Image: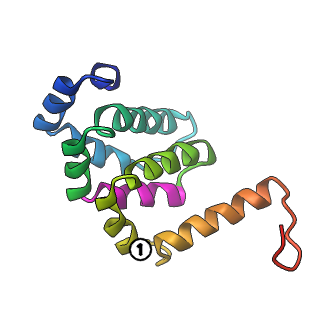
Amino acid sequence: MSNLCKDNRDNQKEFRRKNGIEILKVNLAYSEVEQSGNASTFLLSVIDCLSNAVFGNKRSEMHFLDIEGVYVLLDLAEFCEQGLRRLCLSAICTILENPKSFQYFVEWSSSKTTINASQLLVKLYKEEDKRFGVQIENGIL
């Protein structure tokens, strides 16, 4: 589906009309943990489809916002594995380019940890600093 919708407005429109965006949202919430890596591969495919079938199409983006897709992306970013996190954050950045998405970003709070979206991004930034061994002394990088 991702390749069919890439740079094709007619296919993106048909995808939206056939409830494809709702299906993407449901599948972004897929959190089955298993050892084979199939869940990660599946989520990678879903994010790729989101990028090609929704982003860049104003009506599709608005529909994704209306069904609270930003909330699902933020939920995914909070707990997904490191490899998927970068793609998830990229998707969040892309949808936040739409001025109407900011309201959803500000309203989100984690159902598990009760942090807000800004706190989540700071937490993820600190985790990346720690992972790469960045040393901060007296608040100076």
Q: Badge 1 is on which residue?
A: 109
Task: Identify the element where label 1 is drawn.
Answer: loop
Q: Residue furthest top?
A: 4
Q: Position of residue 51 (x, y in %)?
A: 38, 36
Which part of the image, by quadrant, shows the C terminus? Answer: bottom right
**Residue name at image x 38 percent, y 71 percent:** 108
Q: Is residue 63 left or right of residue 28?
A: left
| Vertical side of 95 occupied by 43: above or below | above
Q: Nearer the viewer, residue 40 or 106?
A: 106
Image position of 52 with respect to 81: above or below = above
Residue 40: x, y in percent?
51, 38
Can residue 12 be seen in this snapshot? yes
**Residue 109, horizontal then vertical, whole percent:** 41, 74
Quarter occupied by residue 35:
top right
Q: Is residue 140 left or right of residue 14?
A: right
- Which residue is nearer to you in this view: 84 or 57? 57
- Residue stretch in magenta: 67-79
Q: Residue at x 23, y 44 (%)?
A: 58
Residue at position x 78%, y 55% from top? 131
